[in-house]
Image (spheres, grey):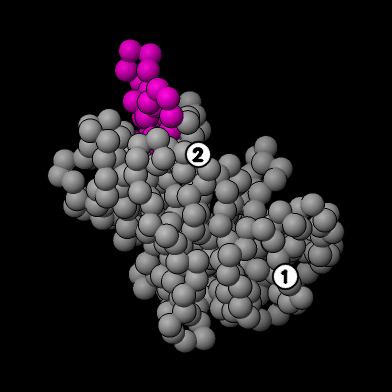
Amino acid sequence: MSVVTSQVTTRVVLEDEAEIRLDRWFRRHFPGVTQGALQKLCRTGQIRVDGKRAEPATRLMPGETLRIPPLNLAVAAPVKATPVIDERSRKEAERMVIYRDDHVMVIDKPPGLPTQGGPGIVKHLDGMLDALRFGSAHRPRLVHRLDKDTSGLLLLARTPGVAAKLAAAFRTRVVHKTYWAIVVGRPIPPHGRMELDLVRVEGFRGERVAVAGVYDTDIAHAITDYRTLDHASKKLSWLELTPLTGRTHQLRVSCASIGSPILGDTPYGQEIEGRNTALVDGFAEQLHLHARRLVLPHPDGGKLTLEARLPPHMAATFKDLGFDVPAIVTASRG
């Protein structure tokens, strides 16, 4: 059985699709398009990204517009029924919500919960979003991502139109994200900007990100401002991190590159004499990276500011180190 779509359409790349390959984007949205058909559509210029020809391996950026030609699908895409969410999962999802209106929703993601699914991942946030409709006909949409072990603020759009607006806001850098991290050592200088060219690499721990070499291609430029808020002698420091770009593992690689890996971040620590430099005796072997603050233009006007409390393992570390945590702004709109 085949299905032919009848007209040219356009789709906007969302923030949670940052750096995804074009062919993988099509597999996600149009699973009936074969790789061979996609290659032909690219070769003949029928698929375009922001009006330009593209290859199947082209990496997409949030806010870019895809031209989708009429498609001859190999199979009819099944109509997805709204999955049944058990009451326990529904309550778990609802407890994460710290702000909600008719346009956006913000959740405080706990560490250890993947944002999206993948090989071997059964439970993930994307699979819980139907529990967060709150009577809406639309399923909430992720507009950016956090690593599995990173905690804190995640922004959701409650309609497709709002999702497109927010993706554009992220792309044009009018959304401001602030992270807190506990890092090993004491960065010198105590504040500054970290700029790196990053490249994806395959290692024994799976796909990771590394600082690009001279001959590497397909690189992504990453910019992060940092500021030391407090420190415990030269052992551990509390950093405020402000990413100016949105690259995969940007904060983790950047901290490691200046010799101060994030506490608990063993994939980016160094193994020296059988000991990982991202681990410190007496402190939790969990990633100490938290999406603390989010400031964005609200789709309905004004500015929305939110902050999230530290997760338990980071709160315990702050207490042990004697770091004073200011009160949070749960939600402020002005």
Residue 261 lies in the magenta-colored region: yes
Which residue type does callout 1 highlight? Arg
Q: Report the quarter where the C terminus lies.
A: bottom left
In the rendered image of this protein, does residue 320 appear above or below residue 168? above
Left-right relation of 105 to 310: right
**How many residues crowd mark 1 within 10 Å: few (<14), some (14–19), many (20+)?**
few
Of marks 2 and 1, the one in the foreground: 2
Q: Which mark is residue 313?
A: 2
Determine the CA span between mark 2 and mark 1.
Answer: 30 Å
Left-right relation of 140 to 201: right
In the rendered image of this protein, does residue 59 appear above or below residue 4? above
Question: At which x and y percent is residue 113?
Answer: 61, 46
Question: At which x and y percent is residue 226?
Answer: 26, 52
At a point 38% along the width and 52% down the height, the residue shown is: 325
Point out the residue furthest to the top here. 273
- Residue where numbered disc 1 is placed: 133
Left-right relation of 178 to 286: left
Label 2–label 1 contact, CB within 8 A:
no
Which residue type does callout 2 highlight? His
Residue 324 in sight: yes
The boundaries of the magenta stretch are 259-283
Question: At which x and y percent is residue 292?
Answer: 43, 57
**How many residues crowd mark 2 within 10 Å: few (<14), some (14–19), many (20+)?**
some
